Image (spheres, rainbow, N blue to C red):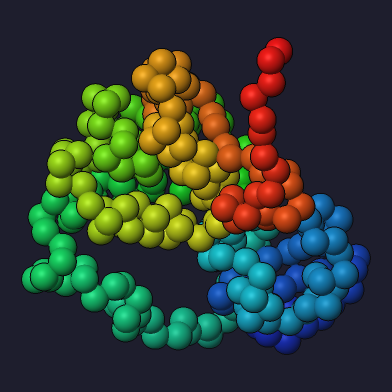
Amino acid sequence: VKMSTTEYSAAEVAKHNSADDLWVIIDGNVYDLTVFKDLHPGGAPPLRFVAGQDATKDFYALHRKEVIQLPRYQRLKIGVLAGYKAPPQPTETPYASPTYMRKNSPYYSESHHKFRKAMRDFIEREIVPTAADDDEMGVDPTPELHRKMGEAGILCAAIGKSAAFSGIPLPGGVTYEEFDYFHDLIGCEELKRIGSYGLSDGIIGGFSIGLPPVLNFGSEDLKARVGLPCLKGEKRICLAITEPYAGSDVSSIRTTAVLSQD
């Protein structure tokens, strides 16, 4: 996308403050939203409210920075704000990263760091590019993504040692013998790090609570027919609880089953 570097003063932007002529400023960039207002997922009123103004604060109250960086929105940029100076940004937000990511930790070994790197590399490559849009538009994770996650060992990592029978290698070359709760924690952190909670839950949430009962209590035949294809990403699974008293607490189920003659 070719970016415009035309400079506009705040006073000039302020003149374009109607529904038929709607400009806004975001991060020192000037956007013409006159046509886009009718396509805005949130409708036109929120845009008319900030017409002709600096909408940076309002924008980030509702969106992530990655949204404005998408090519389809960058096409709306018509110039920059004259004299704008970006606020200083810290090289790293204090306490943004867990303390255990420091070089020396009594809990995290080289195995954990390799596991995190492998998880992050995959997620950044296969999930992050479309995560925000998929989450906002309610797009289901694709079968192809599930297969890739299966091949990368991420689905096995979501289950842990119970998935060892599959023979699928875990991310980062971690063995099932050394896989522990800290590896499990890292997997959860990396999937949530994308900032699209609905999408990340859709990818792994139902899977991580639906498959363990099969692997821990099912027969070898059931594990082979159901468990292995799920770990490979060829099939999907979830835990369905329909009883009104149970909610997400399976142990509260009141329904019982009696084996009958037929």
Pick whichever, 248 or 56, lies toward us.
Answer: 248
Residue 105 as seen in the image, left or right of residue 251: left
Q: Quadrant of residue 222?
A: top left
Query: Residue placed at 41% from the left, 15% from the top?
Result: 221
| Rendered location of residue 153, percent (x, y) | 31, 34
Q: Find residue 206 and report its horizontal and vertical position in percent.
A: 55, 43
- Is residue 149 placed above or below 219 in the rendered structure? below
Depth check, front residue: 201 or 119: 201
Q: Nearer the viewer, residue 31 or 160?
A: 160
Q: Nearer the viewer, residue 256 or 40?
A: 256
The spot of residue 179 in percent (x, y) is: 21, 47
Residue at position x 59%, y 50% in the image: 250
Is residue 96 left or right of 179 when viewed as pictured? right
User: Furthest residue to the top?
Assistant: 262
Estimate the x, y position of residue 6 in percent, counting from the top left: 59, 68
To which quarter of the image does residue 55 belong?
bottom right
In the picture as drawn, the residue positioned furthest to the front comes out as: 261
Res 86 visible: yes
The residue sitting at 85% across, 61% down in the picture is 43
Quadrant housing residue 12: bottom right
The quarter of the image holding the C terminus is top right
**How many numbered discs sit on the rendered protein?**
0
Q: Residue at x 55, y 56 (%)?
A: 196
Question: Does 40 appear above or below 257?
Answer: below
Asked whether residue 30 appears in the rendered view, the answer is no
